[in-house]
Amino acid sequence: MFDLEWVAIAAAVSIGLLIGALLGPLRRRPLAQKALGSVWLALAWLAVVLIVRGDVRLTAPEQSFSKAILIFLACNAAFQVIDLVVWDVVLNRRMVRGRQVSRLVMHVLGGLALLGAAMLALYNQFPDQARGILVTSTVVSAVLGLALQDVLGNVIGGLALEFEAPFHIGDWVRIGDVDGEVTGMNWRTTAIRTRDNHIVYLTNGSVAKTDVINLYRPDRSEACDLFIGVAYDHAPGEVREVLLSAVRSTPGVLAEPAPYVFVHEYGDFAIVYRLRLWFDDHWALPRTRDGVMTRAWYHLQRNGMGIPFPIRDVRLTTVPADAADTRAARARQAVTAALTPIDLFAELDAQQVAQLAAASRRVTFARGERLFRQGDVGGPLYVIERGRVRVDVAGEDGGVVTVAQRSAGEHFGELGVLTGAPRSATIVAEDETVLVEVDHAAFAGLLRTDPLVAERLARVVSQRAEETTAQLAAARPAADEPRAVASLLARIRHVFGLG
C-alpha cells in the first residue's frame, strides 16, 4: 500500500477533471482527441510502471527506461493539453485583430518542448549519460546543422515572418511573380492560392529573403492602369470625358479614390491614354479589366471616336468617287427600315420617315449598360433595331421594380423627346443592343416642314400613354382623351416653338 499525500490527491483530482473536460464539451474537437489520446497513453504507462517498478517516484536516478519514458509521455500529454487550451479554448479559432492566427509558433514550440522533455527524462534517470551526450552534442549539432540547414532556415524564416507579420492568413500578397491569397503557413512553407485556383507553396526561407507586397495594407483598394489609343482627330478633353464615363459605369470600379484619365504619350498612330482606376476585389480583377475595356469601346464608338491600329500590309485599292455617298445611303436605308414599322410613325408618309431617318443615327450599347436613369432630363427617342432592354421603375419603398422588357421593333422615350418630360423609368441594355436614336433636332426639322405632324404624333403618343396606364391601373375614362391629346399637343408645340 502507498501513503496517500495531498499532492497525490490533488494530482489525481486534476487529472480526473482534465479527462472529464476532454470527454465532455471538448470531445469533438480534433486537438481534444489528440490530447485525450496523449493523456490516456501517459496514464496507461503510469500503470505499467506502477505494476513493474512498484512506485512512480522520480526523486532519485534509478536508470529506469520505463520511468524515463513516463516522464516523456507526461510532458507530451501536458503540451498537448496546453495546445488545446491555447488554440481551441482561448483563441477558439477566432480572428485576432481581424486576422486568422497561424499555428506555426505552436508547432515550433511543440517540437522544442518534446526535445526538452526527452532531455529531461534522460537527465532524470541517466544523469551521467546525459552529461556525456551534452558534451558530444556539439559535434552532433554541427553534423545535423549542416544536414538540416535548409529545414532550419525555413523554420527560422517562418518564425521571423510570424513575429514580423508582413501578412496574415487571408491577405492578398505579391511575392516575387506569385499573386494570390495567403491560405496557410506551417513550419516549412507558406501556401498561396492564385486566381487560377492553384495552391503555390513557397518555402519560408525564400519568402523571408524576397520583397513582399501586401495588397491589403493600408487597405484593400489597389490602383490598376489600362492603356487605350484614340485617334489624333479628337481633342484630349473630349476623349477624357468619354473614357471617364466608361470607367465609372463599370461594375467593380471604386468611386473613391476617383478614377482618372491621363494623356500618356503621343504614339505613332494614336494618342495613348492611361486609365487609372481603383478596385478592392482582387479575385475579380480580370473581369473588372474586361469590363472597362469593353465599355470604353462602346463609349468611343457611340461618340464617333476611333481606336486606330498600325497597318503592316499596305494594299492599294480603287475607291469609287461615290463610295462615301453609297455607305451613307445604306446607313439611311437601314435607319429608315427600322423606323417605318413603328406605330408612332404610322401616319407619316414615306418622304417624312426618310427625312426623319436622315437626321437620326445608330448607336450601340453593351450588355449591362444603362441608357438613362429615371428622373433624367428628357432626351432622344430610341428605336430598337437589334437586342433587348429592361425597363426599371423605382418603387415606393426605394427598391427597383422591372416593369417591362422591350426588344427589336419597339421604341421608348417618345415623351422625353417630344415634350421634354423627365425620364419616367431607368433603361438598361440586357444584351448588346443596336438602337436608332431620334433626337430633338430630327423632330424639329420634320415639324417645321409640316406642323400638322405634331397633332398626329400627339394623338399616337396619347393613345400609347393610355395603354401603358391601363396596364398598371384602371384605364382613364373616354371623356378624358380629347383633353389629354390637347394638353400633349400644347406641350409639343411649346417645346418645338410652333406657336
Image (cartoon, rainbow, N blue to C red):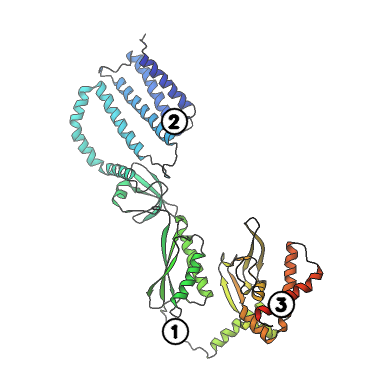
Tell me how far mark 2 sits from mark 3, CA to CA.
84 Å
The residue sitting at the bottom extreme is 321
The residue sitting at the front extreme is 499
Q: Relative to 271, say whether 25 is above or below.
A: above
Horizontal and vertical percent for residue 81?
39, 29
The residue sitting at the top extreme is 1
* Picture quarter with the N terminus: top left
Q: Residue at x 21, y 38 (%)?
A: 143
Label disc, if present, on residue 315 of the rendered structure: 1
For badge 1, the amino acid type reads Arg
Q: Which class describes the residues within 10 Å of circle 3: few (<14), some (14-19), or many (20+)?
A: some
For badge 2, the amino acid type reads Ala
Q: Relative to 12, say whether 112 is above or below.
A: below
* Picture quarter with the C terminus: bottom right
Can the viewer see residue 466?
A: yes
Q: Nearer the viewer, residue 53 or 291?
A: 291
User: In the image, which is nearer the foreground, mark 3 or mark 1?
Assistant: 3
Q: Mark 2 = which residue?
A: 32
Q: Which class describes the residues within 10 Å of circle 2: few (<14), some (14-19), or many (20+)?
A: many
User: In the image, which is nearer the foreground, mark 2 or mark 3?
Assistant: 3
Horizontal and vertical percent for residue 77?
37, 27
Query: Judging from the image, what secondary structure is the residue with disc 1 in?
Result: loop
User: In the image, which is nearer the foreground, mark 1 or mark 2?
Assistant: 2
Horizontal and vertical percent for residue 261?
43, 69
For badge 3, the amino acid type reads Ala
Quadrant assignment, res 155: top left
Q: Mark 3 = which residue?
A: 490
Q: Relative to 162, say whether 29 is above or below.
A: above
Please indicate whether residue 68 sits to the left or right of residue 195 in the image.
Answer: left
